Image: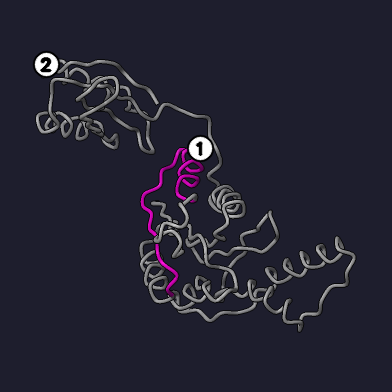
Amino acid sequence: MRIGLIVFGDELLSGKRQDAHGPKLIELLAERGLELDWARYVRDDRSQQAAALRAAAASGDVVFCCGGIGATPDDHTRQAAALALGRPLRPHFEAQALIRQRAAEMAQERGESVVADDHPDMQRRLEMGVFPEGATVIPNPYNRVAGFSMGRLHFVPGFPVMAHPMMAWVLDTVYGWRPKPVSLRERSCIVQDAMEAQLTPLMEAVEAAFAPVKVFSLPSVDHPEWGRCIELGVKAGRDGQQLDAAYTALRQGLIQFGATICTDLVR
C-alpha cells in the first residue's frame, strides 16, 4: 500500500509559507516502519484540486490531504472532494455536534450564552461540518473542528498543530500502524576513486540479488570532509531482513572494483 501527500494552498507555491506537513508525515511514517511514496502541492483552485483528488482516489493509495477544509472563500477542499468523488455535500451530524460542543465551551469560558444555530456566526462554524456524503470523522484534539475521511483519502486542516496529531490518529486508528522500535534501515559508505557510471552494474546486481532492498547513490563534488565522493548504500524499505547481506555484497564489490572506502555509515 503506497502512501501519498497532497498539500493545498497558494501560499506554498508563492513561497509565503514553507510546507511543514511533508517532513512531519515522513517522521510519523518512519516511526512506524513506513515511507512516503509521493507528495504534491496544489493551488487554491477547485478544479485543480478536484483533478488531483480524482487521481488520488483512482490510485488506491493512502493519501493525506492538508489544508482548505475551512469555510472562507479560499477554502475549496470539501467542495473539490465532493466534485472529485461524485458525492453531494451534506451536514455531518457528528462533526457539527462537535462544533456546537466547542462553541458552548468557548461561550462558557467567556461567561456568555451560546448563539443559536441560525446566527450567522454559528452558520459559518457549522459550515465546517459539511462533508461529502459518506464521510467519516477525523477527530481534532486542538479545537474539535473535525477533519474527514473518504475511503483512503484523509482530509485534515492546514494548521500543523491540528493536522499532525490528526494524521497520527489516522495511522494508528484507521490502519493500526503504530510506532515501532527503531530498527536498522540503512547502511552506506563514502566512496572515492570511482564514478557513478562505473558502479552502476554493481548497484543493479545488488538490487537484483537482494530485492526488495534498494541501492542508493548520492554523489558530491565538494563534500566538506571527503571532497569529490559518493555516498553509496542500501536501504531496507519495508523489509529489513536482507539489509546486512546486501551491504556486505555491495562493499565486497567496491573492494573488487578498487574504489577507496573512506568510512561506513549506519542510520
73 relative to 1 in the view: left or right: right
Please provide percent x and percent y for residue 30. Answer: 46, 38
Looking at the image, which residue is at 54% across and 76% down?
A: 73
* Residue 44 on the magenta segment: yes
Looking at the image, which residue is at 44% across and 65% down?
A: 10
Of 125 and 78, the residue lying toward us: 125
Would you name the residue on which mark 1 appears? 31
- As helix, strand or loop, the secondary structure at mark 1 comes to helix
Q: Which residues are magenta?
A: 21-45
Identity, as a three-letter code, of the amino acid under mark 1: Glu
Looking at the image, which residue is at 77% across and 80% down?
A: 117
Please provide percent x and percent y for residue 127. Answer: 64, 76
Please provide percent x and percent y for residue 243. Answer: 33, 27
Q: Residue 266: which quarter of the image?
A: top left
Please provide percent x and percent y for residue 144. Answer: 70, 61
Given this view, does label 1 or label 2 mark the residue nearer the observer?
2
Q: Residue 174: which quarter of the image?
A: bottom right
Would you name the residue on which mark 2 appears? 258
* Residue farthest to the right, as pictured: 111
Identity, as a three-letter code, of the amino acid under mark 2: Gly
